[in-house]
């Protein structure tokens, strides 16, 4: 099976780096799983008027943290657009703003 490369949106990279060290370790562990199984996350669609069709979400840290990403099959690439808390749909708003 081919291994996917991981690429962070610049702002998603900043979000990841701002996480507490212990949480960052758990998030990184989940991201590494995506390298071999990009379909692990749940498909996103239209959430509260934010069209994230084609993107997926992955839960981390007792479902408190979300990773929003898109898979580019032809390039074997996982593009992470947002990493953060779900509170008030913030992570989804950030993802939507970055892709539009």
Image (spheres, grey):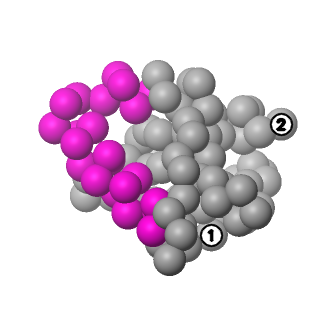
Q: Residue at x 47, y 40 (%)?
A: 83
The magenta stretch spans residue 39: no
Residue 95, horizontal then vertical, whole percent: 65, 40
Q: Residues within 10 Å of mark 2 (few under 14, many from 20)?
A: few
Residue 56, horizontal then vertical, whole percent: 60, 61
Q: Residue at x 19, y 30 (%)?
A: 21
How many marks can you see?
Answer: 2
Foreground: 36 or 47?
Answer: 36
Q: Which mark is residue 100?
A: 2
The majority secondary structure of the magenta stretch comes to helix
Q: Which mark is residue 43?
A: 1
The magenta stretch spans residue 24: yes
Residue located farthest toward the bottom when viewing the structure as drawn:
1
Q: Secondary structure at mark 1?
A: strand
Part of the protein shown in magenta: 15-36
Q: Residue at x 24, y 49 (%)?
A: 26
Query: Is 80 above or below relative to 43?
Result: above
* Quadrant hosting residue 93: top right
Left or right, 99 with reference to 79: right
Q: Residues within 10 Å of mark 1 (few under 14, many from 20)?
A: some
């Amino acid at each position: 099976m081919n291994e996917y490369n991981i690429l962070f949106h610049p702002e998603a990279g900043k979000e990841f780096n701002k996480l507490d060290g212990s949480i960052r370790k758990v998030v990184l562990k989940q991201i590494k799983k995506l390298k071999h199984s990009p379909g692990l996350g749940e498909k996103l669609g239209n959430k509260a008027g934010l069209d994230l069709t084609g993107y997926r979400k992955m839960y981390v840290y007792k479902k408190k943290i979300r990773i929003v990403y898109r898979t580019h099959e032809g390039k074997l690439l996982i593009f992470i657009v947002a990493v953060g808390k779900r509170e008030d749909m913030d992570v989804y708003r950030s993802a939507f703003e970055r892709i539009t």
